Image: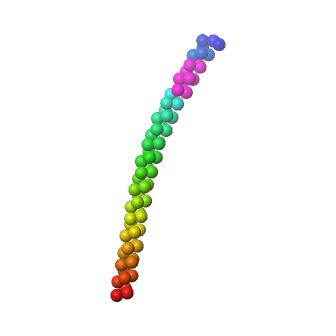
Amino acid sequence: MSEQEVKKLEYLVDDLLQACEHLKQENKLLRERQGHLLTERSKLIEKNDLACARVEAMIVRLKALEQV
């Protein structure tokens, strides 16, 4: 293997290492974002359930008022 081929191989390996590091960082950020989005989703579902319960309670009260 010539010195030029070795240099080219070293360059390619360095490129692969940089790409790997970049992908690791991107993956870490995406996992963090996913975690935040799942937390936000849970909170929104909880708020939606609470709103539904309140609306249902209002409907029950209105129906009770109609019967009086």
Q: Is residue 22 left or right of residue 51?
A: right
Q: Nearer the viewer, residue 17 or 32?
A: 32
Residue in the foreground of this view, choosing between 31 and 53: 53
Going by the picture, which residue comes out furthest to the bottom? 68
Residue placed at 51% from the left, 34% from the top?
23
Rendered location of residue 42, percent (x, y): 43, 55
Residue in the picture at 50% in, 28% down: 18
The total number of labels drawn is 0
Q: Quadrant of residue 33?
A: top left
Place of residue 31 in the rendered image (x, y in percent of width and height, measured from the top left): 47, 42
Q: Is residue 6 left or right of residue 32?
A: right
Residue at image coords 46%, 38%: 28
Quadrant occupied by the N terminus: top right
* Stretch of the chain drawn in magenta: 8-17
Does the stretch in magenta take in 1?
A: no
- The residue closer to the viewer here, 58 or 33, is 58
**Identity of the residue drawn at 38% across and 66% down:** 51
Q: Quadrant of the C terminus?
A: bottom left
Q: Quadrant of residue 58?
A: bottom left
